[in-house]
Image (cartoon, helix red, strand yellow):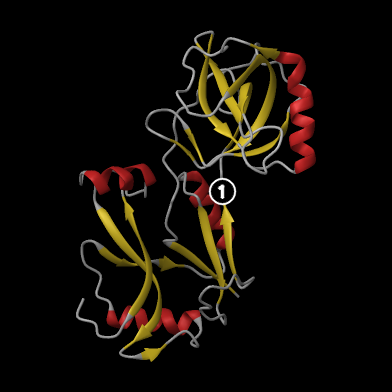
């Protein structure tokens, strides 16, 4: 790109065989290039010494398309108008993280969150058996994160942890739920090797968790605790994608970039 005094906003992503951005492939690429990498451009902030942020997103996009010639490794992110629901459904079907909706009359506002730009997430949800928790640190009382498991071939396996999604009251209520279930030995066949102190519990409680993706080593990434499913039995579950009985097929990893943009009118 032969550009002078130009600031672009974009994101580098690594693509799988189907052209889906995968965060873990990008992590691997940083150590050893093994997948196609593309720099997706979304916004133009500065060009030839002039501030462009006062232009609307549509005007900025038009200028961006004028000065950027798409080539291998550099692309201008696409967008559609008025069909945000259809695009969201497609993103969800493809296992992407979600979409960005921007008002056509809005402007780029560096360092400021604006209701004119919305990130509409599409995160998978699943139920897991709570098999323990880590000790809280600093100002975090009661517990650090729940340890999550699921049954595979009749054996309970550890698949990750969740420490977000709790209020202070929720943390206190959670520890009260777990205290009668304390045990000394791990109930999972693959206890995690982590520095935090772990308190194991009997695998009798089931919770629902939202997460970004399954990693290649079968661990959950970017989890959020959603709530308890008190009507579910941790030991007698049907092997469906949203159960805690078996690890579901790993979907395509979500879109870590913002390469689909929907201007909202």
Would residue 104 be seen by someone viewing this image from the given angle?
Answer: yes
Q: Which residue is mark 1?
A: 122
Residue 264 place in picture, x, y as percent = 59, 71
Residue 255 place in picture, x, y as percent = 43, 51
Quadrant position of the N terminus in the picture: bottom left
Mark 1 secondary-structure assignment: loop
Task: Report the residue that reaches farthest toward the front.
Answer: 138
Q: Is residue 70 left or right of residue 196?
A: left
Would residue 18 be seen by someone viewing this image from the given angle?
Answer: no
Q: Is residue 22 above or below residue 262?
A: above
Residue 44, quarter of picture: bottom left
Q: Is residue 245 left or right of residue 7?
A: right
Q: Is residue 257 above or below residue 130?
A: below
Residue 240, quarter of picture: top right
- Nearest the camera: 158 or 67? 158
Q: Is residue 238 above or below residue 213?
A: above
- Nearest the camera: 26 or 86? 26
Instruction: Write the residue at 49% across / 51% down.
Output: 91
Residue 193 place in picture, x, y as percent = 45, 23
Instruction: Write the residue at 31% across / 82% down.
Output: 6
Label 1 crowd (10 A; few <14 / some 14-19 / many >=20): many
Residue 67, quarter of picture: bottom left
Quadrant position of the C terminus in the picture: bottom right
């Amino acid at each position: 790109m032969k550009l002078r005094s130009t600031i672009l906003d974009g994101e580098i992503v690594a693509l799988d065989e189907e052209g889906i951005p995968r965060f873990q492939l990008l992590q691997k690429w940083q150590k050893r290039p093994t997948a196609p990498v593309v720099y997706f451009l979304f916004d133009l902030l500065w060009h030839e010494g002039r501030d462009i942020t006062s232009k609307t997103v549509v005007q900025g996009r038009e200028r961006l398309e004028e000065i950027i010639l798409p080539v291998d490794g550099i692309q201008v992110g696409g967008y559609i108008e008025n069909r945000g629901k259809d695009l969201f459904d497609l993103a969800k079907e493809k296992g992407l993280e979600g979409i960005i909706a921007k008002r056509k009359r809005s402007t780029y506002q560096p360092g400021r969150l604006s209701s004119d730009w919305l990130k509409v997430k599409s995160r998978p949800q699943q139920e897991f058996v709570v098999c323990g928790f880590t000790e809280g640190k600093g100002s975090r009382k009661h517990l650090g994160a729940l340890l999550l498991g699921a049954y595979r071939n009749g054996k309970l396996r550890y698949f990750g942890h969740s420490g977000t999604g709790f209020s202070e009251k929720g943390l206190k209520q959670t520890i009260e739920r777990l205290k009668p279930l304390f045990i000394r030995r791990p109930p999972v066949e693959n206890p995690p090797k982590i520095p935090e102190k772990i308190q194991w519990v009997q695998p009798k409680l089931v919770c629902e968790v939202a997460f970004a993706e399954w990693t290649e080593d079968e661990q959950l990434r970017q989890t959020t605790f959603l709530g308890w499913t008190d009507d579910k039995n941790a030991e007698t579950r049907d092997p469906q994608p949203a159960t805690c009985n078996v690890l579901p097929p790993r979907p395509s990893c979500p879109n870590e970039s913002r390469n689909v943009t929907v201007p909202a009118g």
